[in-house]
Image (tube, rainbow, N blue to C red):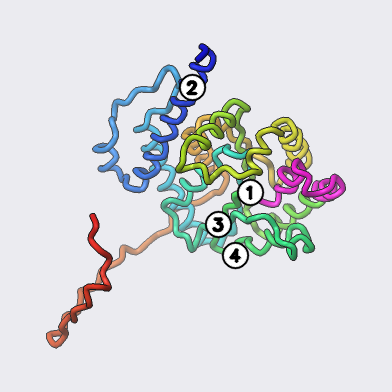
Amino acid sequence: MSGHDQSNAKNLADSMRHDLIDGLDEELEMEFDDERLSALVDRDAPVDDATMDLPRVTYFRELLDLQRELVKLQDWVVHKGLKVVVLFEGRDAAGKGGVIKRITQRLNPRTCRVVALPAPNDRERTQWYFQRYVNHLPAAGEIVLFDRSWYNRAGVERVMGFCSEDQVKEFFNDVPEFEKMLVRSGVVLLKYWFSITDEEQQARFMMRIHDPLKQWKLSPMDLQSRSRWESYTKAKEDMLRATHIDVAPWWIVDAVDKKRARLNCIHHLLSQIPYGSVPHTMPILPPREHHPDYARGDLPEELYVPSVY
């Protein structure tokens, strides 16, 4: 193996190690509160000078603090009857799903929901382009996170030839008016573009190829998008120029470092929606009723899941 190949293999191994740790951290995140955090994570973990990785304890503490604020924001949205829409766009493997997962981790799914639409079916292709997205817009007291949105037309549809240039031009003419209508109707609209480098996308795709637990994330479309990096870059630049408007500007998230990207995006989202604390009455658990004539019946053993572990 040449020195270049050895270096590439080492870089891939390092990236897979970091990705594995990130996956394990995801499982730990939901278990954390202030007391558990101090016990589970090394308080004095240093920054890795070689990679400038964010110390895990710092990441976990900041994430937990931001998630507390997200819960407050959720309460405020319900209390004030706000309608919030957040769009997450970016190249494949840019980390959109990771930040969406951290936003929703501790929120009520009845208040905050994720919309990730598949490719349009034959009927939807004959509808007004925005129609299938309108069906998922929030009512009062709801937050909707779009994991890809109507901007598919400006990105994957355009680059992969699923629409004509005339349709793209029409989209660029229509989308500013569409979004102005949403804002005028009271919708809080935020748009994030997750930006990664050519090299970082290559590394993340390679990790997915070599990790059996993540191979499902790679579709034939993803592989084709990799070969069309420059076409996607041009499409992104055209999109930003045509649809960056005062009432609904684009915000670009530097997403090469996944953990920093999550924290920065959530922090920014919170800063864009003024909110306050909603007073809550502490719930009182009622005493359990006991009836002397009640006897619990025995259930057949075959109804129980076998105790394999």
Amino acid type of disc 3? Ile
Q: Earlier in the sequence, mark 2 or mark 1?
A: 2
Neighbourhood count class around disc 1 (C-alpha, 10 Å): few under 14, some 14–19, many 20 upward: many
Q: Earlier in the sequence, mark 4 or mark 1?
A: 4
Circle 1 residue: 148
User: Circle 1 sits in a helix, a strand or a loop, which is it?
Assistant: loop
Circle 2 residue: 9
Neighbourhood count class around disc 3 (C-alpha, 10 Å): few under 14, some 14–19, many 20 upward: many
Distance between mark 3 and mark 1 Cα atoms: 15 Å
Distance between mark 3 and mark 4 Cα atoms: 9 Å
The residue drawn where x is 49% and y is 33% is 260
Q: Which mark is residue 143?
A: 3
Q: Position of residue 271 (x, y in %)?
A: 54, 42
Q: Earlier in the sequence, mark 3 or mark 1?
A: 3
Describe residue 294's horizontal placement relative to residue 257 as left or right.
left
Circle 4 residue: 139
